Each structure stands twice: as C-alpha cells, then as structure tokens.
Image (cartoon, rainbow, N blue to C red):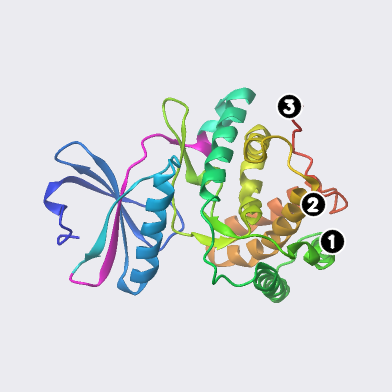
Amino acid sequence: MFDIPSYSSFKKIEAVNKGWSDDKKYYIETDDGRKLLLRLSDISQYERKKNDFEIMKKAASLNVPMSLPVDFGVCDNNISVYQLLTWVEGEDAETVLPDLSDIEQYNLGIQSGKALELIHSIPAPSSQEDWETRFTRKMNYKIKKYKECGIRFKGDELVIEHIERNKYLLNNRPQSLQHGDYHIGNMIVLKDQKIHIIDWNRMDYGDPWEEFNRIVWSATVSPHFASGQLHAYFNGNPPDEFFKLLALYISSNTLSSIYWAIPFGQSEIDTMMKQSQDILSWYDNMSSYIPSWYIKTSN
C-alpha cells in the first residue's frame, strides 16, 4: 500500500478482520483527521473493482446513506487494486437492534427501506440476460448442489416442491442494481440513530425484489425492523405478488445456505440448519406465502 498516492497522510493503519470478503481491509486515520476504510484486492479483480467503485459513486450521488467512495487505483507494484472509502463510525445494526424499543427498531427499518428504494432506482444494463432464464438456471444449480452436499434439513422436500411450483413467478421481472448482501449485518447505526449501508463488494443486477432474500437475518433479530423496511420500500403493505416471490427467493437461498456453510465448519452449518427450521415455521411448512413475522401496517 506504500505506493497509494495519499499514503504519506496515513498516520494510523489497523487491520479489519470482520466480514466474509477475500479483500484485505484496513482502518485508516489521516493527518487531517479523516477516517477511511482501505480495501485491497488482487489485481485480477481490477475490472470488477473499478466497476464497483463507479457504481458506488452513482449510488452516493443519489444520497444513499453509505460508506462513500474516495479513491481507486493500483498499488503494491501493480499486484493489488485499492479502494478508499469513508469510514462509517457507529455500531453494527445487528448488535444495536435488540437493545432498542420496537418503534426505534421500526424507524431504522424505515430508513433501510428508503435507502434500498434509492439503490434500486439504478437500472440494469440493457444487455442484461433475461431474469427468468438466469434465475431458473441458478435455482436448478442450487437444488442439485444441495442434494449432493450430504447434509439435509427436515422439511427440505417442502422447500424444493415450493420452488418447482412457483418458478413461473419469475416471468417478466424487471432488473435493477442490487447491493447484493442487504441485511442488518451490513448496516451501521450512527449516534444520531441514522443508518448507513456498508460492504458493497457483492453488487449485481437482478430482480429488485430478490434483494429481500437476506431479510431473514433482519427478521430473526427484529420483525419490527424487517416490517418497517418493507413498509417504507412499498409505501405501505407489499402486494401479494411480492410475498409470493419473496417466499420463492428465500426458499432458493435456504438450500444454498447449507452447502455454503460446510467449508466454514459445524457452527455455521448449525446456524443455517436452525434458520431452515425458522423459515419453515414462518411459512407454515410452505403452505403460506406471508411470513409469520410480518407486521401489517394500517396506514
């Protein structure tokens, strides 16, 4: 990192070990008092990281509350790509939420829903593959990989049947930018109770409603937060079509979460196995398409 143009202004550099990304991350303090996040990636990621940086600039221009892009380039004698972003000072939403009142949780959910609406206002490129074709292929792959992985959860046949019965819902879905990992683990709550979105390294384009597949993490910790997110995004209660698609997307993710967890050890497997049972409970063994945690609004 010594050849980053602003390196001489770095007075404090601390490794950041949180998260699942392969990027090397550092907390930076500069001579002029700025707090930054430095992400280093292999040079083979150059085009992807450059594109991510440009999209982040576009999202920032829409006033999405987020870690702001500062600088991008090549370093370490051309073997690394770097992104410099503003550091978001606060606490992880997943840590903060359980200590807040229901209304405070709900209000943070409202903020997250409004932020997601802004993100989804950025359209997908016209060259993007048809969503039904792409996601059907993805679901078929997940079913195959799950069946081959050697670990099965109770009720998995109900989830697989639900996917097969509801694939038709993918027809004619629009596509937009997706954050790619939108849940309370990637949200920071500031001292003034404002929420900021971090970890933009999984961005993609797809059905904007698929983005809610990670809401399971938010709903597990705070149904009020998760419900508030939906109320803000849809300006009221979501339509039935949304809930039907959400059940399909969550079903697909439930299968892939099992084999995804295997390399990370028994603790992650146990977490995903428990989540599979929570999901089956929320959806009454897939006989309902509205999850039991959802709190309707009368507005």
Residue 194 seen from this side: yes
The earlier-in-sequence mark between 1 and 2 is: 1
Q: Hey, what amino acid is under mark 2?
A: Leu
At label 2, counting other C-alpha atoms closer than 10 Å, the crowd grade (few under 14, some 14-19, many 20 or more) is many
The amino acid on which the numbered mark 1 sits, given as a three-letter code, is Leu
Residue hosting label 3: 299
Side of 193 where 170 appears, left or right: right
Question: What whole-number distance in Å separates the C-alpha atoms at marks 1 and 2?
Answer: 9 Å
Q: Which residue is mark 2?
A: 280
Count of numbered marks:
3
The answer to whether residue 21 is above or below residue 219 is below
Residue at the spot x=40%, y=46% of the render? 60
User: Mark 3 is on which residue type?
Assistant: Asn
Question: Which label belongs to residue 54?
Answer: none
**Closer to the camera: disc 3 or disc 2?**
3
Q: Tell me residue 119's x, y (percent).
A: 51, 49
Residue 103 as seen in the image, left or right of residue 63: right
Q: What are the residue bounds of the magenta stretch?
A: 77-95
Residue 189 lies, in percent from the top left, at 46, 33
Looking at the picture, does residue 224 appear above or below residue 272? above
The residue indicated by pointer 1 is: 158
